[in-house]
Amino acid sequence: MDLTEAQLIIEQGLSKNEFISFFCHCSISYSGRAESYLDFGDRFIAIKQDRTVMIHQPTGGMPINYLKAPASCSFKIEDGILIFSGSSRDDEIHVEIKEVFSISSRKLIDGQKQDLSGNEAEMSDMIKDNPSLISPDFKPLSREEHTKYGFIDVFGHLGDGTLAIVECKRYTAGLSAITQLRRYVEKMKSVKGIDKVAGFLAAPAITPNAHQMLKDWKFSFVEVIPPKRNVKQRQRQRTIKQFFE
Amino acid sequence: MDLTEAQLIIEQGLSKNEFISFFCHCSISYSGRAESYLDFGDRFIAIKQDRTVMIHQPTGGMPINYLKAPASCSFKIEDGILIFSGSSRDDEIHVEIKEVFSISSRKLIDGQKQDLSGNEAEMSDMIKDNPSLISPDFKPLSREEHTKYGFIDVFGHLGDGTLAIVECKRYTAGLSAITQLRRYVEKMKSVKGIDKVAGFLAAPAITPNAHQMLKDWKFSFVEVIPPKRNVKQRQRQRTIKQFFE
DNA sequence: TACTACATCTCGCAT
DNA sequence: ATGCGAGGTGTAGTA
């Protein structure tokens, strides 16, 4: 495809804030928080409607280069090469495009927001509603609370009045989960001036090293499978409800 | 665009392992590690050559849904709707496509790898080569070493023989950086049976809370600006060198 | 804005 | 395969 024509289509798309996507043969220089260079090869480039820029190689899940919105984007042809210069707050990229294979540009209309289930907040919700998952005598007091001790997933006390902190992890808990729990427990001990605060780790599994550290610090592991709502069901129900209202 | 034609183009692209990209009007159900539903709207969908799947809304840097490679992808038309079913190891998505606006599919050739500079490894490199950045009497012994105590950025000793552990962060260090350092220091103490191991945090800055915790644990903060090579320069030099060899 | 922690984190590396 | 930590992490929530 002729580079002058490509430049025209892209600049029209930019002026109309369309979603621009194209395949090309290019090299990429990046400079900002870090620096990188990627020699010539075939890539996919997209400029989204908020001027997010992302450049993908043919494989892999993450963009090889990107700019956060809103990036200023300019195109010019120099020595027979289409040069794309983009810059955002912290970073800039220079793309030398030797060939453009195809371009699509379109205004996309989408006001929807995703309904996502299965995050850590829902797990701590479940534990607060079902405290026996932690211990028969666990009484939760708060959940997902920002305190001066830290961001504690579930906080409460045991039957004998001992304060208890629960740290939730949706996946196999590693060393960092234990250090996180330890930090909250230590902080609460020092601020409250008490020498006994119970620490619980709620997760579906725990790594061996983390389990050792947990035992060293006299914390308890509780196997908890994180919950999931059926969001499609929920969405449908809401739609039906709206229909009848 | 006719949905039957769209299905044909996509399936041809899949059979040739091409990079397929298209704009469409669709809804998306996701189920796997989490669950989500996104009601109908205009989206961009790409299936990469390794069968990575990503779906983007018109704005924002991250895909709203995705599948890790290699995903199995199938398309069928049912009740006048093109249905895209994709499944990878842990997850699956169901996309109901009411309209396809445009499709591009192409085999991209790209054997290049990115040369990235400004990562933590280069920072620990610099410290090992310039130990006085940490302390006048710091003698580094190793860097970026996987030990049973953890992954220690720079390890060495001071003039009086005290062992020293350096944790590097490229950005403002927070609480987790201190707990990480603390974990290495504590573990090294207990394994070696000594009661004094020096801990250094090397970073361009540190948050107030982290600084307090650092002081509580008698660690030291050293202001270090992470280095950056000029990778484009380096690439050019290598090219010139190759030319003369 | 700075700080904190989650993420369908992803990715690479070492065990 | 699993464990572990970095990331140009991004993103949301809060003070």
Image (cartoon, coloured by chain):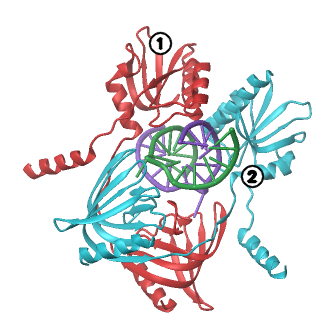
Chain colours: A red, B cyan, C green, D purple
The reply to whether callout 1 and callout 2 are in contact (CB within 8 Å) is no
The numbered disc on residue A89 is: none
Looking at the image, residue B62 sits to the left or right of residue B154; the answer is left
Mark 2 falls on what kind of element? helix
Question: Which residue ends up furthest to the top in the rendered image?
Answer: A160
**How many numbered callouts?**
2
Chain under disc 2: B
Mark 1 falls on what kind of element? loop
In space, the residues marked 1 and 2 are separated at their CA atoms by 45 Å
Looking at the image, residue C6 sits to the left or right of residue B209; the answer is left
The part of the image, by quadrant, that contains residue A57 is bottom right
Disc 1 with disc 2 on a shared chain? no
Q: Where is residue B186 in the image (x, y as percent from the top left)?
A: 71, 26
In the image, what residue type sits under mark 2? Met
The residue beneath circle 2 is B123
Q: Residue at x 42, y 56 (%)?
A: B67
Q: Position of residue A91 (x, y in %)?
A: 59, 66
Depth check, front residue: B109 or B212: B109
Q: Position of residue A75 (x, y in %)?
A: 53, 83
In the image, what residue type sits under mark 1? Thr
Depth check, front residue: B71 or A88: B71
The part of the image, by quadrant, that contains residue B84 is bottom left
Q: Position of residue A242 (x, y in %)?
A: 13, 50
The residue beneath circle 1 is A162
Examine the rendering and report whether any part of residue B225 can be seen: no
| Mark 1 surroundings: few (<14), some (14-19) or many (≥20) residues within 10 A | some
Question: Which residue ends up furthest to the left in the rendered image?
Answer: A244
Chain under disc 1: A
Looking at the image, residue B49 sits to the left or right of residue B148; the answer is left
